[in-house]
Amino acid sequence: MNVDSATSAPPRTTADAASKTQVDYQSFLKLLVAQMKNQDPTNPMDSTQYMAQLASFSQVEQSVQMNAKLDQMLQSSVLGQADALIGRTVTSADGKTSGKVEEVRLTSNGIVAVLEGGKELAVGPGITISAGDAA
């Protein structure tokens, strides 16, 4: 059984993780049943090999669930950071864009601050956040 393919991409949401785990689990069970049905009766596969496969799958399933929990924690942290920006003054790394944050958007690429007047500024390395104007 190839375990690398099941862990190559982290899930995006808890629902995706649960769905992926369920699909992987069902696929594993189908593979296990197919192996049992198609093995040579005069030379059956050792039961320890089945147990090793089951243990490997269990580890993969736990990793998928742990990744989902870590994603939830990361999203909570990002939401806290986004909330703290509203009402503060931010300045871009090059100093060309500056203004009071009116709104914050969470995108797949990170946090985008919408300034008064409608300008948008991606929150990332190099920006300056002024605490003086916090609401």
Image: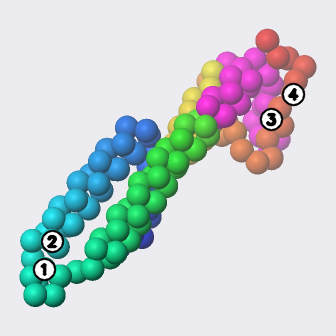
2 and 1 marks in contact (CB < 8 Å): yes
Mark 1–mark 3 distance (CA, rounded to whole Å)? 67 Å
Q: Secondary structure at mark 2?
A: helix
In 3D space, how far apart are the residues under numbered discs 2 and 4 (Cα atoms)?
A: 66 Å
- Return the residue at label 1: 39
Placement of the N terminus among the 4 image quadrants:
bottom left
Estimate how packed mark 1 is, as few (under 14), some (14 to 19) or many (20 or more) residues with alpha carbons within 10 Å. Answer: few
Q: Which residue is mark 4?
A: 130
User: What residue is pinned by disc 3?
Assistant: 91
Q: Which residues are magenta?
A: 76-102
Tell us which disc is closer to us: 2 or 3: 2
Q: Is residue 113 visible?
A: no
Cα distance in 3D space between marks 2 and 3: 64 Å
Nearest to the eye among marks 4 and 3: give it.
4
Residue located at (46% from left, 60% from top)? 59
- Residue at the spot 69% in from the left edge and 39% down from the top edge: 123
Q: Amino acid at mark 2?
A: Met
The amino acid at mark 3 is Thr
In front of the other: 80 or 57: 57
Q: Nearer the viewer, mark 2 or mark 4?
A: 2
Mark 2 sits on what residue? 36
Left or right of 78 on screen, residue 23: left
Circles 4 and 3, Cβ within 8 Å, touching? The answer is yes
Query: In terms of depth relative to the viewer, which is nearer, 51 or 38?
Result: 51
C-alpha separation, residue under disc 4 versus residue under disc 3: 8 Å
